[in-house]
Amino acid sequence: MRDLAETSPRHRPDAGGAVVSEGRWAHRHLLDVDQLTRAELEACLDLAVEMRERRDRHEALDDLRGEVVGLAFMEPSTRTRVSFELAATALGAQIVNLPIEASSVTKGESLVDTLLTLQRTGISTIVLRHSLSGAPYLAARSCDARIVNAGDGTHAHPTQALLDALTLREAIGPLEGKKIAIVGDILHSRVARSNIHSLTALGASVWLAGPLAWVGDFVDWPGVTVANGLEEGLADADAVMALRIQLERLSGDSAMSLREYAAAWGLDESRMELARRGAPLLHPGPVNEGVELTPELATSVRSLIGTQVTNGVPVRMAVLSLLAQ
Ligand code: CP
């Protein structure tokens, strides 16, 4: 199957842009974080904090009142789908869930026709998750609704990167000059790709550690260092992000077994001691416990895995609000 992300940069409907005025975005769609300037990234994180405070004070928020948000998840999701639904509801929107298994997609209706149908029913924003890299770019070119990428294939997961940036900023302070180690299957990870863009844009130094086949493509990426082994990657890191092994995206002939991966690259408390004292641990979830990290580390005081999930709602509120302005 053709990977649409290969062609997407030439056709990006919403690349570039600038902050229109203080704390605003000039974008109609959120396709990846690489379309956002540092000021736009920071504006989103600041707005997420403000949204969280206002929601916690039970203030009425009506940024999306009168709008209909469609949740088109064509791949499984728990965190992203639920937090987008809560975020849009908190902003006063009406929600339409499109359960793919009960939709006309099962009768062969195309992605574009499906999205056009949603738009014609009055849906103004479509949150799209799709197994095909680049699908949100096709969507943004094909219909008039705002498109929010909720994860496309191995390409991008922009709202995950935004909630990770907020979680990191609140745990270790401004990211300028900080060493962030990302460990695992970078090659198949949309979370890693988006985080590389946002963390480097925010001034962090990103180190990648993993089996050569999963990190080798990134040696020339600006702002990124491919570590010579796990120890170098973790050494003095200000924070560590473990990635989920993408079992559903690996081919059956993957050279390394999960047991071998866990032995060579799996994180536990003793390996985390190579990082700075108290360095936090992130993971986008769901965790393959005993593979990427031990259950003890996942529930330790270092772990921000629960905080990441919690931050997903205000970050997605901020994204939906900024796109609607
Ligand atoms: N992190 C993440 O995208 O999780 P879900 O697949 O559960 O949405």
Image (cartoon, rainbow, N blue to C red):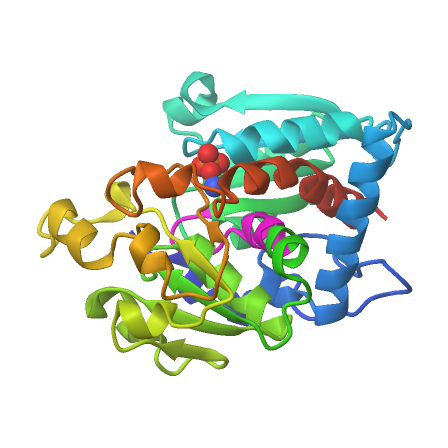
Residue at (39%, 49%) from the top-left corner? 153
Residue at (12%, 52%) from the top-left corner? 260
Residue situated in front as seen by the camera: 67 or 240? 240
What range of the chain is rendered magenta? 152-165
Residue at (21%, 65%) from the top-left corner? 211
- On whether residue 119 falls in the magenta region, the answer is no
Residue situated in front as seen by the camera: 201 or 31? 201
Confirm whether residue 191 shows in the render: yes
Can you give x and y, in whole percent of width and height, for residue 156 in the image? 48, 55
Residue at (24%, 40%) from the top-left corner? 290
Residue situated in front as seen by the camera: 69 or 264? 264
Can you give x and y, in whole percent of width and height, for residue 86 in the image? 68, 27
Can you give x and y, in whole percent of width and height, for residue 325 in the image? 86, 48
Residue situated in front as seen by the camera: 207 or 134? 207
Confirm whether residue 184 shows in the render: no
Q: In this view, does 169 lie to the left or right of 325?
A: left
Classify residue 94 by image quadrant.
top right
Q: As displayed, is residue 322 above or below residue 287?
A: below
Can you give x and y, in whole percent of width and height, for residue 303 in the image? 48, 44
Residue that extends furthest to the top in the rendered view of this protein? 102
Q: Is residue 210 left or right of residue 279?
A: left
